[in-house]
Image (tube, helix red, strand yellow):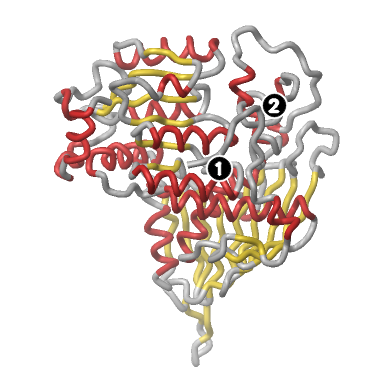
């Protein structure tokens, strides 16, 4: 982005935010045209799955232009270029190396839809280039990276929105406020879960030659060198420790984030996790398909659980959170929420609720679209987004603590003030990011 554009967007007032709204139909004709000085130019790194979903949400925001796409898979890149051209009427530039993309003179912000092991470096270097960032969750693939990324954002004074879009949901926010305000009474137990069927479990496949359209060296980046294997590529990368943290950093980050929001918490004192490959012991996955983790906070316990054997979880829900309070129990997922109050017997023998019964509250709107609107607004106003780097860091650390406990096979104790494990060298060694192939983590 040239200097005049950067200064203009930085000085813009909040009045422009009122004009931001997402059209329901996404095509060139439906896109609202704004003055050039009021437009925001974005690019996407990693355009196959979630990166593409995020781009579509941003293109619904008036004045947002997609000027470039970046991916290591030319097949995906060609497909998405055509898709963007159909939506916007213009053809974005293409890149295979995000570092070259960051040199684009008219770029304001970048969306990162890459695997977890790339989030830190790509966010830090975007901040260094003067770009604002929308980075997918989990924020990073290690606890150390979370800390270094936060330092980079502060140093370069950038806007970073983490893709935990439930923060922008019109049913999660009021429900969590109700918990925080004490409507359930004192809450001492919370359970969050994701139960899915075996369709995403990957079976062993032989390594093979890298497809000619794929820059596999760039895809690996700071991860260890390994032969190309389809199981470790694209969406199924998340089941391998080199690149991600399995269900815990996939679904766990989304739901545990809401636990932290509702309970007004940031970090546990300890965690004990257990699990394994119990749904399919012969799968190719490294991360556990079945896991339970007990987190102890100052005044409540949180249990995280996941399995990949069937989708019928607690209360018949494949995912959700249960807040257990002295006055009632809240059950909430992405579809909606409800409260079942505790009853008490009166002197005449009748029973009554100790709090008002809350009927089912369904979700309305699209939180991914709302998250994009919030990010674009903050690019212009320079206000903090609804899910800034600190919030993304808090929940990513909590998820990584669970994985570290699981991998060590024992309980671990965390000092959030010192950002370290308590008297545990073995666990502390797992805090550090392991970089390879000449890539280094630094601000």
Q: Residue at x 76, y 35 (%)?
A: 285
> Counting other residues with Cα less than 10 Å from the Cα at mark 2, is it few (<14), some (14-19), or many (20 or more)?
many
Disc marking residue 140: 1
Location of residue 273 in the rendering, given as x and y in whole percent from the top left corner? 73, 57
- Crowding at mark 1 (Cα within 10 Å: few <14, some 14-19, many 20+): many
Q: Nearer the viewer, residue 361 or 435?
A: 435
Identify the residue at horizontal 43%, vertical 75% (top origin): 355
Percent across and percent down for residue 282 are 85, 34
Q: Residue under label 2, please give it.
A: 232
Point out the tag, 2 or 1, that comes first from the N-terminus. 1
Residue depicted at x 55% and y 45%: 145
> Looking at the rendering, in which quadrant would you find the N terminus?
top left
Query: Between 408 and 195, which is closer to the camera in this rendering?
Result: 408
On residue 381, the disc is none
The answer to whether 13 is drawn above or below residue 115 in the figure is below
Q: Is residue 5 left or right of residue 190?
A: left
């Amino acid at each position: 982005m040239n200097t005049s554009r950067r200064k203009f967007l930085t000085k813009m007032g909040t009045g422009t935010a009122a004009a931001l709204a997402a059209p329901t139909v996404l095509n060139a004709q439906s896109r609202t045209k704004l003055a050039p000085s009021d437009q925001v130019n974005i690019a996407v790194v990693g355009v196959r799955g979630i990166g593409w979903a995020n781009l579509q949400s941003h293109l619904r925001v008036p004045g947002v232009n997609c000027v470039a796409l970046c991916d290591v898979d030319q097949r995906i890149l060609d497909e998405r270029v055509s898709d963007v051209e159909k939506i916007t009427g213009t053809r974005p530039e293409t890149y295979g190396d995000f570092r070259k993309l960051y040199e684009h003179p008219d770029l304001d912000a970048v969306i990162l839809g890459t695997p977890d092991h790339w989030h830190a470096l790509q966010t830090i270097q975007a901040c260094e280039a003067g770009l604002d960032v929308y980075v997918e969750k989990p924020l990073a693939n290690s606890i150390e990276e979370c800390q270094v990324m936060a330092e980079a954002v502060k140093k370069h004074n950038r806007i970073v929105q983490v893709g935990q879009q439930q923060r922008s949901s019109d049913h999660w926010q009021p429900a969590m406020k109700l918990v925080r305000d004490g409507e359930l009474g004192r809450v001492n137990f919370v359970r969050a879960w994701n139960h899915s069927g075996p369709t995403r479990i990957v079976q062993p496949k032989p390594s093979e030659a890298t497809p000619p359209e794929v820059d596999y060296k760039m895809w690996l980046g700071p991860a260890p060198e390994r032969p190309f294997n389809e199981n470790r590529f694209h969406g199924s990368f998340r089941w391998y420790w080199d690149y991600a943290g399995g269900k815990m950093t996939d679904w766990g980050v989304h739901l545990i984030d809401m636990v932290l929001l509702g309970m007004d918490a940031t970090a546990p004192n300890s965690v004990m996790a257990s699990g394994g490959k119990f749904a399919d012991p012969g799968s190719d996955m490294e991360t556990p398909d079945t896991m339970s983790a007990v987190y102890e906070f100052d005044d409540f316990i949180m249990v995280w659980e996941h399995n990949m054997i069937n989708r019928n979880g607690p209360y018949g829900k494949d995912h959700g959170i249960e807040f257990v309070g002295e006055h009632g129990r809240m059950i909430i997922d992405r579809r909606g929420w409800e409260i079942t109050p505790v009853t008490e017997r009166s002197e005449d023998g009748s029973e009554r609720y100790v709090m008002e019964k809350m009927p089912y509250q369904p979700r309305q709107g699209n939180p991914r679209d709302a998250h994009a609107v919030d990010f674009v607004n903050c690019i212009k106003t320079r206000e903090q987004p609804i899910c800034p780097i600190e919030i993304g860091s808090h929940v990513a650390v909590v998820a990584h603590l669970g994985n570290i406990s699981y991998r060590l096979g024992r309980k671990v104790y965390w000092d959030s003030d010192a950002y370290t494990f308590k008297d545990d060298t073995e666990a502390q060694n797992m805090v550090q990011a392991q970089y390879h192939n000449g890539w280094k983590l630094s601000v």
